Amino acid sequence: MTGDGGGRWGNSVNGGTQHGPVVQAREIGSYTSQHFHFHGGEESGGPLPGRAPTGHQLPLGEVAFKNRVAESGDVLRALDREVPSGPVHPLIVTLSGISGIGKTALAVHLAHELKSRFPWSTYVDLDEWRTAGAVDTEAVLKHLLRRLGVREGWLPAGYRDLVGMYKTVTDGARMVLVLDNVWSADEVTTLLPVSARSVVLVAGQRRLHALEGPRTVALVLEPLRREPALDVLSEYIGSTGRQVSPQMVSRLEQLCAGFPIALHTAGGLLREHPGRRVERIVADLTAALHEKGLSVVEAVWNAAYDALDAADAQRLYRLMPRYSGYDLTLEAAMALLGTGRDDAEDALDLLTNAGLLADSPRPGRKRLHDLLRAHAVRRADRYGDPAETEDGLRRLVAWYRRQAERADRVIAPERMRVAEPVPALPYAPDVPFAGEAEARSWLDTERKALYGLVGTASDLGEDTHAWSLCEPLWKHYEDHHNHTDAIRAFGTGRDAARREGSAEATKALIRMRCQLAQALWKAGRPEEADTETRQALRSAESVVPDTKLHASALEFRGKFLAACGRPDNAVPYFERSRALHAALPNPYGVLLQSLLLGRTLRAAGRSAEAGEELETALALAREEDHPRMIGRTAAELGRTYRDAGRPERAFAAYEEALDQERRRESTYDQAVLHEELAALAEEAGDRERAEEHRGSARELRVRAGAEPGRAGEPGTGT
């Protein structure tokens, strides 16, 4: 093999330069010693205009290539669509994503898949033709024309003439062209065949919006999902003949975070060291991925970071590993940076275009993949400033606390609170909440960030923020029962309030103990919950006697005893709490305690007393026009009548509860009520009515994504 100057290669066989058919092998990009296959070539000067060349010059595909079925399907469907009229234009498939995500592998895989449909294909790595960041397009055109069969003596000297010949030779051709490591759309446009019968696969870190049009398939690659990632590792393990426990395979898969390059590195280590303990390989790979980075992509990621032409973009990248959320909104980026909307927008755009941030599956958000998170930590360790990190996180904590407090007030305006609300902040706008459903949705969407920021606030010494954030998280926990997150956050909030020691924090400590206690007993830790409720009630009786907070502590003690199967012991606590609310007066408190008292009496088998209390509570809820409480109370009344053997009264109560949950758009509660109505109808011998309710419950679960559809398709997640 001989160079032709300027980094290109001609074909050499037995010492003589050839221009006919040969088989060529060398390193192409990340494909080491891959085989290229070329068949064809004419002894004439080149293919006639409009005639498709033949032959395939592609790297071999990855042996352990897995998944990407959806992406391949998108391409094949686009090929089968009718070609629109207008300018002659090939089908363009853009593959974008961060380095190491498998863009080249998929492009080569697709090219091989398409060989049966196209007589000619070739692969070009533009990085091999790049000098000081610029592609030598003239040299690439000559290279492509040679591969298309044009003999050396026929290649014109001038650039314009080369472009003209390329257009002539590719006019109407049926060919697949793979262009790898593309930096911009300008590098591609001149190389596009003049043929609607051709396909061009364009791989690069950045999404090239300028190439997108009616005949473009834009594929933004994400890490592999768990199953195909495990398949890649299993294939490597199978080739070594060694036994690896499922637990260790799972640890390797989690460590690689779905990055094909990391999975292949792990597989390579297993092959190269057949006698080495898997535990040691996991430790070595951990160090490689999180402490030093994989050398094959670390330099690329470093270069992408260094090339960012805005300090704010680099700073945002360094700050993002400290952000606890799954993905980032523009407003959260504004809070982290504190420099305004324009700078935050520019920073997000620059990081996305550089391949360091990816679009989140949730619209309008960006996310940092796990391995890039480790890279961002290394950049922060080298270039970051502790002061900039602390300032950014303090702004972020305050902004999230304000939004959570606002959402909580929309959901439950009458609920007791201890913390003073955060005032409007100058560096980031508020999230609009049109109603309760939007507020609940925001809390759930941001749950990972919110629960994590309680710990962040505590680490920063911001104790007031730490316990204050826990207050609005209470409603989310009540709805979703995420015990582990709540125990961690509410325990941190309790400790923060205890450390602060102010009069406000002393009240908050009672509140935090109550919230923590409920998460503890629901998580099966009753002894700890018992301690927390006792201490909360003791503090309330001495610090804030005869107040709403005292009544709340009584309520939580009663709820704990009821949850532990001691309803008769719980009844007096609800009665005392209700009496305090009535004396204040606090109508909502009276309503809530009446509901809890009725529920507890029912659990104690005292159905008649329960029915009386719940009828009173339901009348109060109607007077207050409180949909949530009407729904909860009516549902509990329906259960009480069902226990008492009064199905018609039970049906009426359940239907009223269902009407209220429809009004609130609470699909989860609607599904629960439909299931209970189905069981009640079954007991009454009305099978048709029972099936209707079961069908309605199932439809709600499918719409919520909690159950697959009839043909096994996933739910819509709406």
Image (cartoon, grey):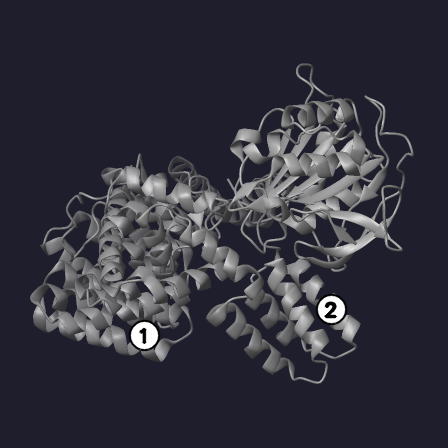
**First-in-chain label (1 vs 2):** 2
The residue indicated by pointer 1 is 529
Can residue 710 be seen in this snapshot? Answer: no
Which residue is more in the foreground, 185 or 688?
185
Q: CA distance from mark 1 to mark 2?
A: 48 Å
Q: Quadrant of the N terminus?
A: bottom right
Can residue 399 be seen in this snapshot? Answer: yes
Q: Position of residue 464 (x, y in %)?
A: 17, 62
Most extreme residue toward the right, as rendered? 43
Q: Position of residue 523 (x, y in %)?
A: 42, 70
The residue indicated by pointer 2 is 236
Q: Is residue 380 above or below residue 363?
A: below
Left or right, residue 225 beside residue 676: right
Identified at 57% across, 30% down, the residue is 211
Secondary structure, mark 2, is helix
Identified at 52% across, 49% down, the residue is 676
Q: Position of residue 620 (x, y in %)?
A: 24, 44
